[in-house]
Image (tube, helix red, strand yellow):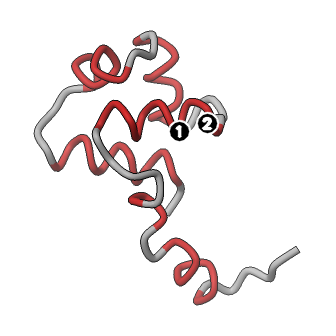
């Protein structure tokens, strides 16, 4: 699962709306919508800001990430 989908799933599972989280993490709402919808690339800095704003360790959204990749039919480049 792509990172923006993982973050969005986390937000939705907590019953938060996107505007609330954008303000909480300190990213402009328009930019945050683009990030969460996958319409803009998520930079490392933005990822760190989101994790910090949500009170999560940056590795939180990587759980099972490498396992998902390993089990997919994709080959590492």
Tag 1, which secondary structure? helix
**Numbered marks: total:** 2
Residue ID at (63%, 86%):
70
Q: Which residue is mark 2?
A: 42
Side (left or right) of 11 relative to 63: left
Q: Closest to the observer: 51 or 32?
A: 51
Q: CA distance from mark 1 to mark 2?
A: 7 Å
Tag 2, which secondary structure? loop
State if disc 2 and disc 1 touch (CB < 8 Å): yes
Residue ID at (51%, 38%):
48
Which class describes the residues within 10 Å of circle 2: few (<14), some (14-19), or many (20+)?
Answer: some
Where does the image place residue 21, in percent across and percent down from the top left? 28, 25
Residue ID at (45%, 16%):
27
Q: Which residue is mark 1?
A: 47
Which residue is situated farthest in the right direction here? 77
- Marks 1 and 2: which is nearer the front? 1
Where does the image place residue 18, in percent across and percent down from the top left? 28, 25
Side (left or right) of 25 relative to 31: left
Which class describes the residues within 10 Å of circle 1: few (<14), some (14-19), or many (20+)?
Answer: some
């Amino acid at each position: 699962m792509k990172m923006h989908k993982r973050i969005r799933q986390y937000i939705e599972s907590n019953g938060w709306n996107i505007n609330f989280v954008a303000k909480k993490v300190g990213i402009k709402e328009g930019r945050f919508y683009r990030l969460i919808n996958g319409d803009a690339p998520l930079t490392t800095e933005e990822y760190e800001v989101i994790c910090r704003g949500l009170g999560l360790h940056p590795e939180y959204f990587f759980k099972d990430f490498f396992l998902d990749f390993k089990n997919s039919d994709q080959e590492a480049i």
